[in-house]
Each structure stands twice: as C-alpha cells, then as structure tokens.
Image (spheres, rainbow, N blue to C red):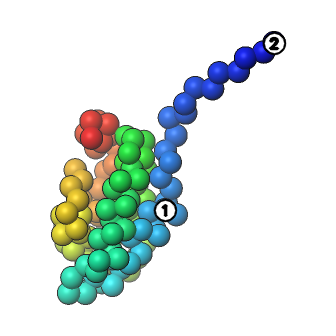
Amino acid sequence: MCIVVAAPLAEAAVTCGLVSSKVAPCIPYLKGGAAPTSGCCGGIKALNAAAATAADKKVACGCLKNAAAAISGIDYSKAAGLPGKCGVSIPYAISPSTNCNAYASILSLL
C-alpha cells in the first residue's frame, strides 16, 4: 500500500488576470472620472479578500504595479488613493514605482 501526502504549496492563488478583471471597472475613474463606481470598489474589495496569503498579496502588488505602468493616462495620485476611497487598506501605493519586494515582510504580517 502506498500513501501519498500532499503538502500545501506556497503558490499564490491570485493571478494578474484576476487583478485585471477586478480593477478594470476603475479605469474610467483613474483616467479622470469624478469618483470610483460601485463596480470599481466592489472589485477592489473582492481583490483584497482574494489576496489572503502573503504570496497572494505580493502577486497582487506586482500586478497592480505593472497595470499602473501599462495603462496610459492614469492619474497616479488617484491610483494611490483608490483603495482608501473604497474602504480598503493596503501598505503600498498603486504606482509604477512601487517596490513590492520592500513590502514583503509587511505583507506577510497582514
């Protein structure tokens, strides 16, 4: 008889595809809209809930950083304040200059 024991992997469940889909409703606001929509804030809250582990949070940080750099016309001050406007607290600003590795120890505590 053979027994196989599978140890849980420390891989992130959050992907950049998930991040993009959750943040997509926020693009109009980030490009000059007056306020984030309920769909935008719902996506931000769902993404925050999905990023349950430190690995998930680090992936989400990197995806948000890359998205901020890739989408032209983003107001980075609005991007940095977006989580707070939606009632979510994260320890870094959404910006192309964010160093997600610098937040690795903070993210592991959250």
Residue at image position (34%, 43%) is 101
In the rendered structure, find residue 101 and report the number of the disc placed on it: none
- As drawn, which residue projects farthest toward the right? 1
Quarter of the image for residue 42 reads: bottom left
Q: Residues within 10 Å of mark 2 (few under 14, many from 20)?
A: few
Residue at image position (49%, 62%) is 18
Dot 2 corresponds to which residue?
Answer: 1
Amino acid at dot 2: Met
Q: Position of residue 81 (x, y in %)?
A: 19, 67
- Locate the N terminus and report the quarter of the image it occupies: top right
Q: Position of residue 71 (x, y in %)?
A: 40, 76
Query: In the figure, 37 relative to 14: above or below?
Result: below
Q: Residues within 10 Å of mark 1 (few under 14, many from 20)?
A: some
* Alpha carbon separation for disc pair 2 and 1: 41 Å
**Is 14 on the left-hand or right-hand side of 77?**
right
Query: In the figure, 19 relative to 36: above or below?
Result: above
Dot 1 corresponds to which residue?
Answer: 18
Query: In the figure, 81 relative to 31: above or below?
Result: above
Quarter of the image for residue 44 reads: bottom left
The image shows a total of numbered marks equal to: 2
Q: Position of residue 27 (x, y in %)?
A: 36, 79
- Locate the C terminus and report the quarter of the image it occupies: top left
Task: Please name which of the two marks, 2 or 1, marks the residue nearer to the observer.
Answer: 2
- As drawn, which residue projects farthest toward the bottom? 33
Relative depth, front residue between 26 and 87: 87
Relative depth, front residue between 42 and 98: 42
Relative depth, front residue between 8 and 32: 8
Q: Is residue 69 visible?
A: no
Residue at image position (25%, 87%) is 33
Q: Secondary structure at mark 1?
A: helix
Quarter of the image for residue 75 reads: bottom left
Q: Earlier in the sequence, mark 2 or mark 1?
A: 2
